[in-house]
Amino acid sequence: MEDLKKYIAEHPFFENMIPEYLDTIVGCASNVRFNAGDFLFREGQTANQFFLIRHGKVTLEIYVPSRGPFIIETAEAGDVLGWSWLFPPYRWHFDARVQELTRAIAMDATCLREKKEADPALGYNLMQRFARVMEQRLQATRLQLADVYGNPVAHSR
């Protein structure tokens, strides 16, 4: 558990987290390893974890019937994957496919939901952190869509 606490404390997502919260969170964590081609999660499955990427690369993808898998973003060491565990009905909206050997810390969503409900300050802290991640992902997706479809803002002015 001490190694997990160290890894969690050093991960950028949990930077400057209150030590008591880290003590609480580590009880919901486990080390995981995935090989290239594995999926961390699939669209439509129950979102029962989120992942702190320690090493490797994972692509977030959607399946487009006429094109096949379409990469939305690539996550690497220092990134966090998954916020669908926060919002009912707790289902993944993307696939997360491993591109190379990946080591991560899996955070048990049921465990964390219980802990954040029992401690609203912890819940607020987690929501602030995930809101930053969501904002960054939305901006990255906006830029990618502008690249794929041209710059709609420039055409409308």
Image (cartoon, rainbow, N blue to C red):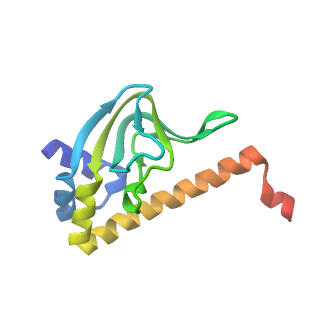
Name the foreground residue: 75 vs 63. 63
In this picture, residue 119 sits left or right of residue 55: left
Badge count = 0
- Residue lying at the far bottom in this picture: please name it: 120
The image position of residue 108, as x and y in percent, is 26, 50
**Quarter of the figure that contains the N terminus:** top left
The image position of residue 8, as x and y in percent, is 26, 49
- Residue lying at the far left in this picture: please name it: 2
Residue at 45% of width from left, 49% of height from top?
92
Name the foreground residue: 35 vs 91. 91
Name the foreground residue: 105 vs 41. 41
In this picture, residue 76 sits left or right of residue 69: left
The image quarter in which residue 54 lies? top left
Residue at 41% of width from left, 59% of height from top?
89
From this viewpoint, is residue 18 visible?
A: no
Name the foreground residue: 128 vs 149. 149
From this viewpoint, is residue 13 visible?
A: yes
Residue 63 vs 16, above or below: the answer is above
The image position of residue 153, as x and y in percent, is 79, 60
**Quarter of the figure that contains the C terminus:** bottom right
In this picture, residue 70 sits left or right of residue 134: right
Residue at 28% of width from left, 62% of height from top?
113
Residue 62 vs 156, above or below: the answer is above
The image position of residue 41, as x and y in percent, is 41, 41
Residue at 70% of width from left, 35% of height from top?
66
